[in-house]
Image (cartoon, rainbow, N blue to C red):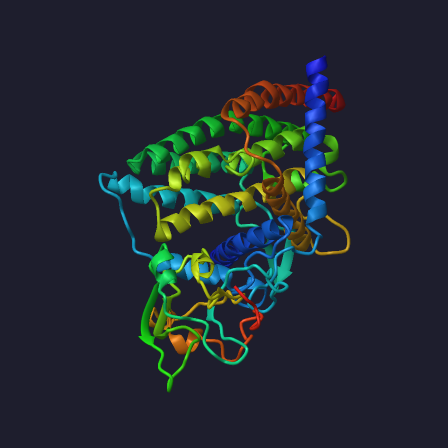
Amino acid sequence: MIEIAIVAVKSALLLFILLTACAYMTLLERRLLGKFQVRYGPNRVGPFGLLQPLADGLKLVFKESFMPAHVDVIVYWLAPAISMVTALFVYAVIPFGPEVMLFGQRVPLRLADVNVGILLVLATSSVGVYGIILGGWSSNNKYSLLGSLRSSAQLISYELALGLAVISVVLTAGSLSLVSIVEAQRRVWFVALQPLGFLIFLIAAVAETNRAPFDLPEAEQELIAGYQTEYGGFKFAMFYIGEYVAIVTMSALLTTLFWGGWWGPVLPGPVWFVLKTLAFVFVFIWLRATLPRVRHDQLMALGWKVLIPLGLLNLVVTAVIVVLRGT
Amino acid sequence: MTTLRVRIRQSLAILKGLAVTFRYLFRPPVTVRYPEVKRAAVQPRFKGRHWLTLYADGMERCVGCELCVIVCPSQAIYVRAAENTPEHQVSKGERYATDFQINELRCIFCGFCEEACPTGAIVLGREYELASFSRDAMIYTKPMLTEPYPGASGRDPQREV
């Protein structure tokens, strides 16, 4: 009984933190982009613009729930929900810290330690693609459809590279559970053992989240906003939450798989985890502020001709080393 | 082999670009927090709100010829002229403007009225904060347009046109 209560409280807390973090990520991104572009960014609503996400959220909630003609109604409503729910679901298996004692109870700082944790993450983020594809498909708009087609092509190409980088980590750690992977980094973080794997994962992660310079599915200049074109109000907000939570997810995964999760000197585990995740969120924004969008053929060439061969090479080398050390 | 070298150079160029943007992160913004902080005064030739200027002796320059009305491309000006009389001498010509209105919402600030004016009566000043909460308030009437004292618009009241 007490276990269920703990899990319920943790879920509620996690959802609250994630949604707030995602709202404030929009502000962080806009302020940082402003700084990168030698201007201020939104600073009007509240001190330092801190109430801006609240104002944006209120605006989106109170907008008219408009639906264009001839849309596939059920799919049109379902798509943003898929996008958001799958993005949030991943957090069930990401560990934030070691077990701690709270009110005389041993509380592990994670929702679940699934023994195929990383597999679950990859599977869920693949399902998340359905949100984008169905959203573009059901909108009855050529831009939406083109955006979602690009998105599916891109995500299939980069999920392979992502998976190859993850398999190398799994081989090194000897487990699919994210908790065990973090435990295995007690002495050496995997970024030192898998530098190539880290780079592949980083590039694939940027492509997976549809962020610049791989933001072809929502290229404003060509496709207006891609699959989001026909969405407004809270349905649009759900797509947005899905997108930003996905960025936090990828940052958390980079931290968990390569940068030692909650391990770190002096500060407690969860603080290290949050700091490292924030650092990667900053990298995402930094990349967006720096790099122009790649062409579609360049995107495909990078995925299939560079990242996947490199990932395979990395996997083979890792496997050989693991076997040699094992004997 | 050469392509590989090119690819490596391109990858390093990405890092170089990231370094450039990172340096910009610490620069003070070039923009200003507008209503609180304002930039230095506009250029002398800036075209802002209109003024009806006066001669140094306080006589109105406008002679009610309506050339500005004719030249105005957005038809923003309305002038009603009246005859000067010896008892009631407002301007130095035969006539003067009893009513002079400019719709600042229609005005495109092209400055044609200033060029057309034979006496140099209508000028475009340097004020650019002309916002208002109603359309009515944006129709400037003669008392609002006329300089409160000669030279108030920033133009020399002694000047010849």
- Label count reads 0
- Residue at point 66% right, 19% down? A313
- Residue at point 39% right, 56% down? A60
- Residue at point 38% right, 30% down? A146
Residue A282 in the image, given as x and y percentages of width and height: 63, 47
Please determine whether, in this image, residue A126 is positioned above or below residue A183: above
Classify residue A326 by image quadrant: top right
* Location of the C terminus of chain A (image quadrant): top right
Q: Is residue B49 left or right of residue B100?
A: right
- Residue at point 64% right, 64% down? B40
* Viewer-proximal residue among A241 and B125: B125
Is residue A316 visible to us here? yes
* Viewer-proximal residue among A235 and A90: A235
Q: Is residue B109 left or right of residue B66?
A: right
Classify residue A140 by image quadrant: top left
Is residue A180 visible to us here? no
Residue A59 in the image, given as x and y percentages of width and height: 39, 60
Please determine whether, in this image, residue A176 is positioned above or below residue A30: above
Classify residue B146 by image quadrant: bottom left
Which residue sits furthest front? B86
Residue A15 in the image, given as x and y percentages of width and height: 48, 55
